[in-house]
Image (cartoon, rainbow, N blue to C red):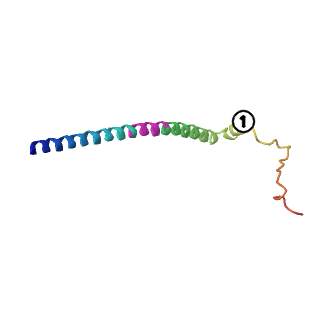
Amino acid sequence: MFAFLGLALKAVGLTLAFVTLAKLALAHQQRLDRHSEIQAVLALQLDRLEGQKRSLDRLFSIDGEQALLQQEQQWIAPNRRRIIWLPPEAAPTP
């Protein structure tokens, strides 16, 4: 009778160990997946940062002002006026 009780306790302990190991394996796999997602996002952001650095370096080069003016298409020509439309409630009263 004690042998059967000992065998039952060992079986329950072994089952508990397998269930715990399965949960740990699942959590480890989820952690690896999340790590690879974060690595991919980091790589994209680092590429973007390098592009921004090159753009900033270009602005501080000898012909940086001309490069900026060529890059921006929304600059107003010197002989033009900028008109800013305000909603009626935001317009100053005379």
Q: Main secondary structure of the magenta part?
A: helix
Q: Position of residue 76 (x, y in %)?
A: 80, 42
Residue under circle 1?
70
Residue at left offset 74%, top offset 37%: 73
Residue span colored magenta:
31-40
Give the residue furthest to the right. Answer: 94
Q: Position of residue 13 (x, y in %)?
A: 21, 43
Which of the pair 23/8 is nearer the observer?
Answer: 8
Q: Position of residue 42 (x, y in %)?
A: 48, 39
Quadrant the N terminus occupies? top left
Residue at left offset 77%, top offset 42%: 75
Residue 51, by quadrant, is: top right
Residue at left offset 54%, top offset 40%: 49
Q: Residues within 10 Å of mark 1 (few under 14, many from 20)?
A: few
Which of the pair 79/38 is nearer the observer?
Answer: 38
Which of the pair 50/86 is nearer the observer?
Answer: 86
At mark 1, the secondary structure is: helix
Residue at left offset 19%, top offset 40%: 11
